Amino acid sequence: MRYISQYPQFRLQVRPFRSRALGDGGVEVTQEPVYAQFKAFIDGGMIFENEELAAARHFDLRGNTQLQDEATPSEPRNRLSVFDSDEAAQENDWDKETQAEVERKLDGWAEASTQEVLKVTTHPIEPPFPNYDEYERGIDQLVVKLIEDGYDLATVLYYEQVFGPRRPEIIEGLERAVEAQKASFVSA
């Protein structure tokens, strides 16, 4: 799940740090903290076009800044930050329960504090055809259909890996098809 904030360094505590003092002067950690730390666009947070448009419609971006010429408005995406729960789970070694806890907390925050967090429900890349995610025929038939209908196989592969159902056999077949297309392409 992806979330957008209008504040570049937005951070939300999901689970607090808890510890207990021991009799020998030591401390026992009873609960590790969990934070949802958003990445600013200027710090490498990838914000897709559909997310930028949703943020511009949703947030009251007051006090727009200007470029150095003092006449051209600056890009609103420079003021945004993004949180991708899948990326954060991978970076922080979260298990599925922790990731679900973070998503529940952010969902609640998006409902309660609408000017701080926006839950993005659309994908920047749509599936190639309406029932693509439920396609049950073989991978060879899927690749033939995609080629005949004129879809870019690399884009379909990216959709399957990032936004789609992430089916291993489909990913493997699309990777083979993309490599075959690259091998058969002759540059002049």
Image: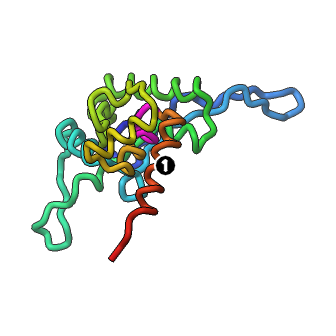
Which of the image's four quarters has the C terminus? bottom left
Report the residue marked by disc 1.
175
Residue drawn at x 32%, y 42% is 146
Q: Which one is nearer the viewer's eye here, 139 or 24?
A: 139
Q: Position of residue 84 (x, y in %)?
A: 44, 40
Q: Which one is nearer the viewer's eye here, 144 or 111?
A: 144
Q: Position of residue 94 (x, y in %)?
A: 61, 34
Q: Position of residue 175 (x, y in %)?
A: 49, 48
Residue drawn at x 45%, y 45% is 174
Magenta residues?
A: 160-165
Q: Farthest left residue? A: 71
Residue drawn at x 36%, y 54% is 41
Q: Position of residue 183 (x, y in %)?
A: 46, 63
- In the drawing, does residue 173 fall left or right of residue 60? right
Q: Which one is nearer the viewer's eye here, 19 or 25?
A: 19
Q: Confirm whether the magenta stretch covers residue 162.
A: yes
Mark 1 residue type: Glu
Q: Confirm whether the magenta stretch covers residue 188.
A: no
* Mark 1, secondary structure of its residue: helix
Against 104, residue 145 (above or below) is below
